[in-house]
C-alpha cells in the first residue's frame, strides 16, 4: 500500500528552530490525547502505550534526521512516526484496526511500519537495537552518510540482544545512535530494583560514547543528538544517548498505580475487598509479611505518582513556558495544529473523546 506522507512540521538541520520543535511536540501530544480519548470510549481496543512525556527526546533526535535515515522504534512508536511525517489519518486508521490503515490494520499500535520512511516498531523489548544495527549496516554499504536511530526504554538494557547490538555496532563501526529513554519504572516496578550496576557503563564497556541528557529539555536533547548523529554520519561509529524522562500516563492507559492516585476513592472501593481477604486469610504468609506487602504497594503508588505526574516534568509544558513570551504566535500555532488534528476525526467521522485537547 502506498502511504500518504505529510511533512507539515518538518525540521531544519542547521538551526533548532524552537517553534518547529514545539510544533512537532504539540502535534504529537494532541494526536495521542485524541487516541487516548478514543481508547477510553472503547473505539480502540487492547493495551495502549503512550509516548506522552517522551516528546522532547523524540523531537530533539528526529529533528536531525534526513531523507534516507532510518528509525527502529519500541512499543511507543506514535510520537516518532508523527514527527517523522507519517499521515496521522493513516496512523489513526491503523490503531482502529481498519484495513486501509498504515499497516492494513494488522500492526496495531506496537508493530508499525513505514517503508517510505525506513521506520519500524516492535513490541518486543530490546528489538529496536538489532533492527537499528540492520538498518545501519545497510546504510554503510548502500546509503553512505545515512544513519539509523534506535529508541528503547531502560528496561531493554537488561536484554541480551541489545548488548549484542552494541557489540556489533562498535565492531563494525556502524552509523547508529542508540537512544535510551529512562523513566525509572519497569511497568509497576522501580527499574533500580531489577537492574544491577550502571546503565551507562554497560554501553561504555562496549566502546560506545555516552551522552546523558535531561529529556524534559528538548533544546538540550537537540544539542546532544546533533553531536551523536554528526559523529555517526562522519563514520565515527555508534553512540548512546541516555535521556531521562517521565511517562505521564504511566506504562499504559489505565496504569493501576496512576489510577490509584488519580481516583483514590473509586480504586480503594474496588480493592478493599480483595485486600481485606488477603489479610485475614488463614493460609499464606505471616501478618508481618502481609503488612510489608501492603506497604510496598502503597510506597509504589506514592513514588510512581511523584515521578510520573508532575507537570514540571512535562516536556511540552516546559517548552511552552519559554514560548509564552510571544502569546500571539503561540496561540496561532496551537490553533493551527488543533485544526489539523481535529480534521482527522472529521475525515473518519469520529467524535472526540474526553481526553482530547486537554
Image: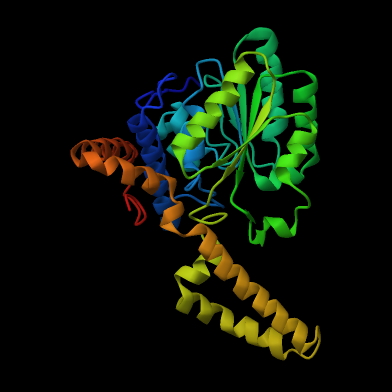
Q: Position of residue 230 (x, y in %)?
A: 57, 19
Q: Is residue 239 visible?
A: yes
Viewer-proximal residue among 198 and 280: 198
Q: Is residue 80 above or below residue 310?
A: above
Q: Is residue 37 left or right of residue 283?
A: left
The number of numbered discs placed on residues in the rendered structure image is 0
Residue 103 showing in the rendered view: no
Residue 161 drawn at (x, y percent): 78, 36
Q: Is residue 286 above or below residue 93?
A: below
Instruction: Residue at 40%, 38% (x, y): give it.
Output: 25
Q: Residue at x 64, y 73 (%)?
A: 297
> Which of 160 and 346 lies nearest the eye of the viewer?
160
Asked if residue 163 is positioned above or below residue 199 in the image, the reply reads above
Considering depth in this image, is 72 or 325 the residue closer to the camera?
A: 325
Q: Residue at x 59, y 51 (%)?
A: 183
Q: Could you tell whether 344 is left or right of 220 in the image?
A: left
Q: Which corner quadrant of the image does residue 232 belong to? A: top right
| Quadrant in the rendering for residue 323 | top left
Amino acid at each position: 500500500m502506498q502511504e500518504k506522507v505529510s511533512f507539515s512540521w518538518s525540521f531544519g538541520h542547521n538551526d533548532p528552530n524552537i517553534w518547529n520543535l514545539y510544533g512537532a511536540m504539540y502535534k504529537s501530544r494532541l494526536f495521542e490525547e485524541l487516541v487516548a480519548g478514543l481508547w477510553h470510549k472503547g473505539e480502540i481496543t487492547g493495551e495502549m502505550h503512550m509516548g506522552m512525556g517522551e516528546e522532547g527526546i523524540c523531537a530533539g533526535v528526529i529533528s536531525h534526521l534526513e531523507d534516507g535515515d532510518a528509525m527502529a522504534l519500541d512499543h511507543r512508536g506514535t510520537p516518532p512516526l508523527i514527527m517523522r511525517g507519517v499521515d496521522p489519518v493513516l496512523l489513526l486508521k491503523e490503531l482502529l484496526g481498519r484495513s486501509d490503515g498504515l499497516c492494513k490494520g494488522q500492526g496495531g499500535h506496537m508493530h508499525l511500519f513505514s517503508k517510505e520512511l525506513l521506520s519500524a516498531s516492535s513490541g518486543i523489548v530490546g528489538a529496536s537495537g538489532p533492527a537499528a544495527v540492520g538498518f545501519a549496516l545497510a546504510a554503510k554499504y548502500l546509503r553512505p552518510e545515512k544513519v539509523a536511530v534506535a529508541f528503547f526504554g531502560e528496561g531493554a538494557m537488561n536484554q541480551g540482544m541489545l548488548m549484542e547490538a552494541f557489540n556489533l555496532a562498535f565492531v563494525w563501526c556502524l552509523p547508529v545512535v542508540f537512544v535510551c529513554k529512562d523513566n525509572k519504572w519497569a511497568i509497576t516496578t522501580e527499574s533500580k530494583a531489577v537492574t544491577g550496576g550502571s546503565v551507562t557503563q554497560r554501553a561504555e564497556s562496549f566502546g560506545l560514547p555516552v551522552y546523558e541528557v535531561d529529556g524534559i529539555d528538548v533544546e538540550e536533547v537537540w544539542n546532544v543528538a546533533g553531536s551523536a548523529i554528526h559523529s555517526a554520519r562522519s563514520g565515527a561509529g555508534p553512540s548512546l544517548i541516555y535521556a531521562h524522562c517521565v511517562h505521564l500516563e504511566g506504562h499504559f492507559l489505565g496504569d493501576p498505580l496512576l489510577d490509584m492516585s488519580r481516583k483514590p476513592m473509586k480504586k480503594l472501593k474496588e480493592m478493599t475487598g480483595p485486600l481485606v481477604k488477603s489479610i485475614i486469610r488463614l493460609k499464606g504468609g505471616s501478618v508481618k509479611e502481609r503488612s510489608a506487602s501492603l506497604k510496598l504497594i502503597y510506597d509504589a503508588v506514592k513514588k510512581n505518582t511523584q515521578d510520573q505526574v508532575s507537570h514540571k516534568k512535562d516536556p511540552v509544558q516546559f517548552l511552552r513556558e519559554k514560548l509564552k513570551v510571544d502569546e500571539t504566535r503561540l496561540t496561532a500555532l496551537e490553533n493551527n495544529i488543533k485544526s489539523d488534528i481535529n480534521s482527522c476525526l472529521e475525515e473518519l467521522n469520529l467524535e472526540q473523546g474526553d481526553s482530547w485537547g486537554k
